[in-house]
Amino acid sequence: MPSTAKVVPLEPRPTPAPLGRVLRVVTKPVSIVWPRPTVDEWGRDKRLIEVISPLAHLRWDVSVGGHQQLPKAAALIVINTRTMALTPLSTALALSEALGRPVRFVGRPDNIPFGPFLRRIGGLLALADEIGGALRAGEIVLLGAQGTGNPRHAGTVDHTLVAAAIRENVPVHVAATLSSMFSRGARVEVSAALRSGRNRRGPLAEVELAEHAQRRLQDLLDEMGGTRTGIRFGWFGEG
Amino acid sequence: MGPVTASGTSALRSHRIACAAVTFCLMRGQRVLVSGMGSELGSLVASVLESQPWVGPIEGIDVDPPRRRLRKAVFHRIDPSNRARVLEVVTRFDPHVVIHVSVWEPDARVNTATARQLTESAAVSILGAAAECPSLQHLVVRSAAEVYGRARGSLTRPDESAAVAPTSEFGRMAARLEDHALDVGTRTGVTVGALRMAPILGPHVPSPLGRLLRLPAVPFSVLADPPFAVLRDLDAALALVAAAKVGLSQPVNVAAPGAITAWQAILRGRRLPIPLIGPEWSIARTVSHLFGAPVPEHVVETLHRGRLIDGGRANDLLGISPATSTSDVIDSLYAWPSVIHLTGEDATLAEVSVA
């Protein structure tokens, strides 16, 4: 036999406390400005990069070439860097824009406030395991050679960091970069993947790959030409 | 590893189906013991196990009764310090698989000291008793991403090969539990799998991080605001059951896809963000504690240094990967089911006929 259960009427819902109303009003503009999460699994903030990109364009006008040779999957790109020129950062932003996908750069510090800020724009720690993890996740990672004072010289490449690419079995490219302290013009030229003639099983593999990358970088820089004034600091006014 | 061709993929799929069929036949009717069945996660694990065809009898142990209705599982309310009773119940059941969820996160249900004591007591008594069972084949342990630690210079997104170097009490508890389980595995010859999980959140999960994020005003580290990943409670339960099913024999990271920062989580929840720089964190922790949301060491570490893990191998090892993204987990945290208050007229309309 069906029986009927009556729902007990409850008191009307109380109006929100004044504090709750105030909080909602205060946080509303902020939540409209930036309501969605934008960091990826490595902490790179796409929205922040969209915000700072115009500022980067004010400083650098980068023309990128050879990026069609990069694979759709993971790759390690070794670039030459000039001391105090933020080359990895400008190159990563330019390549990222050209490729339409995130490009991470190696060399963020792990202290406040620079570390967290650089992580937001794609920085990774200079650790082989960190680079290996990013490569395993299919990311493009940019590794700077040792900084030099002369933009036409390729510094040494850290073989312990290049080892990550060998471990993860991803191609290594080099990219020559040229920029100037006095002008906006900058250039990035990406090469085809490096090929090693030897098949090493031991640690010589990464040492030789790092040396090969440095040599190829120097070749690319030489091919890019430049002024030959004969003066010792002639490169100073380039660009 | 070479590229996988279409025919290779097909062969791989056929091989997996064949393996799954053999496994199913061999595993049918497995006795599964769930320690910590009274917790939100433990009862969810038991609930998922009840729907698994390979699972036979299910029994559970905890100090608190289960938080959801279980139809098949048998629950024993035993204090983990009562070793004699635990030994009696576990050896009588003689499980094939033990899923050890009896891990108390500091300031989730009890304070840090009690959490440490209960976790260690449960590990000693329940895993010790399980080691005495002749049928035991496999042990699955709920561990935590905190085992990797967040010291300066530590990896942003450690994978399973990263060194275990905890820097918080919860991380040390989880690392000790893994060691204990491995010791049991080595002595008895059973396989041991540890699931290093990102912070587990959900609307009903007692979690210090979740409780903090739900406060009306939430402190966050304005200079760092690092990213962290979380894990939905159901995904955690499914991963534990999958680990039991496949006989996981190594540690594996489990985290929801994506990441979020505290600032972004606060904005998603429409809370008031309180930016902090450093020294005032001790005051914020005290105030938060007074409001019923204590902030333990590992949560402060998450908000200061971030908590990301590389969960890329979970799909290969477990056959599943978390379906709910980190931002959706955070949204569900804020989406409390509303209480619908009916007026007198509505209540009359809403009379329910019970057959």
Image (tube, coloured by chain):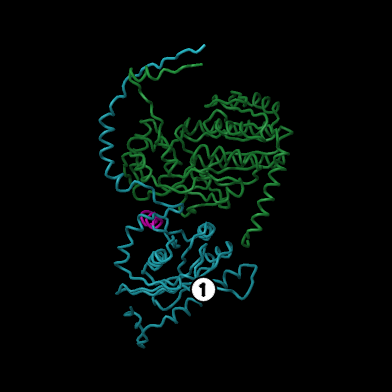
Q: Quadrant of residue B272?
A: top left
The correct choice, above or below, for B345 with respect to B191 in the image is: above
The correct choice, above or below, for B355 with respect to B296 in the image is: above
**x, y percentage for residue A165?**
55, 64
Colour given to chain B in the rendered image: green
**x, y percentage for residue B60?**
61, 28
What span is in magenta?
Answer: A112-120
Q: Mainly helix, strand or loop, the magenta region?
A: helix
The residue that label 1 is drawn on is A192
Q: What residue type is disc 1 on?
A: Ala
Residue drawn at 25 percent across, 35 percent down = A22
Residue furthest bottom as drawn:
A230
**x, y percentage for residue B226?**
40, 49
**x, y percentage for residue B186?**
69, 42
Of all chains, the one bearing label 1 is A
Q: Quadrant of residue B20?
A: top right
Residue drawn at 42 percent across, 71 percent down = A81
- The reply to whether the magenta stretch includes residue A72 is no
Give the left or right position of residue B218, taking residue B142 as reference: left
Colour given to chain A in the rendered image: cyan
